[in-house]
Image (tube, rainbow, N blue to C red):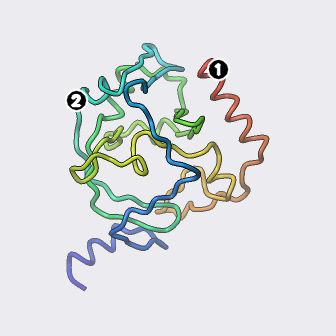
């Protein structure tokens, strides 16, 4: 085994398989979003809530990050180059309050995902627009999120850390728990 192959092998978590493809795992139709009316909002336990149009978000300072993608479904794609707005810059702009522990991401078609703030507030995390120099497609892009609880309801772990083999989370979410998440997101949106 060459030194390069050995180094790549060390970057692949246990039970994962390397791929050069970027599989699309999406539930339902991929939303097509009108970026002239779309907005990015930060609210909740923050000192300075704000909203940005798509063009305003694109105009913010960007950075490039090289990272590996490890999917809970057991594939890994090494050496991805993403460009986008650093999440930490957006969190700083909002002034996140110390009591905040989670971020609820609300997306098209009423989809949501819940992220621990400790996982989100990292220097390598981006609101990414570009991958390998190309604009992200809707299938892989900014304007897409998971159906609330869909993956967890089907047995996947909430965090899915492949290095600790957190692929499956034991019991799935009940429909009642999923509805509670949906209703909480509607309350946050004021709808």
User: Crowdedness of circle 2 by 10 Å Cα count: few (<14), some, many (20+)?
Assistant: few
The N terminus sits in image quarter:
bottom left
Report whether 101 appears left or right of 148: left
Q: Which residue is mark 1?
A: 191
User: Is residue 102 in sight in this rendering?
Assistant: no
The residue indicated by pointer 2 is 61
Residue 48 in percent (x, y) is at 42, 13
User: Is residue 84 placed above or below 7 in the rendered structure?
Assistant: above
Number of dots carrying numbers: 2
Quadrant where the image shows the C terminus? top right
Residue 19 is tagged as: none
Specify whether 81 is left or right of 97.
left
Q: Is residue 77 left or right of residue 165?
A: left
Around disc 1, counting alpha carbons within 10 Å, would you say few (fewer than 14), some (14 to 19), or many (20 or more)? few
Residue at (21% x, 82% y) in the render = 2
* Residue drawn at 38 percent across, 62 percent down: 22
Alpha carbon of mark 2 to alpha carbon of mark 1: how far? 32 Å
Splitting the image into 4 quarters, where does residue 125 fall?
top left
Q: Residue at x 73, y 34 (%)?
A: 180
């Amino acid at each position: 085994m060459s030194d390069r192959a050995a180094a790549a092998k060390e970057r692949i978590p246990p039970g994962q398989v390397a791929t050069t493809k970027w599989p699309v795992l999406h539930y339902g139709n991929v939303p097509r979003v009108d970026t002239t009316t779309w907005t990015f909002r930060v609210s909740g336990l923050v000192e300075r809530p704000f909203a940005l149009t798509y063009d305003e978000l694109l105009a913010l300072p960007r950075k490039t990050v090289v990272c590996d993608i490890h999917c809970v479904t057991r594939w890994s794609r090494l050496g991805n180059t993403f460009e986008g707005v650093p999440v930490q810059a957006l969190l700083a702009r909002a002034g996140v309050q110390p009591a905040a522990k989670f971020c609820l991401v609300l997306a098209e078609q009423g989809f949501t995902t819940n992220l621990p703030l400790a996982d989100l507030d990292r220097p390598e995390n981006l609101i990414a627009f570009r991958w390998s120099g190309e604009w992200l497609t809707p299938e892989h892009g900014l304007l897409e999120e998971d159906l609330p609880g869909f993956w967890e309801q089907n047995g996947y772990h909430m965090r899915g850390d492949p290095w600790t083999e957190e692929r499956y989370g034991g019991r799935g979410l009940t429909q009642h728990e999923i509805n509670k998440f949906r209703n909480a997101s509607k309350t946050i949106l004021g709808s």
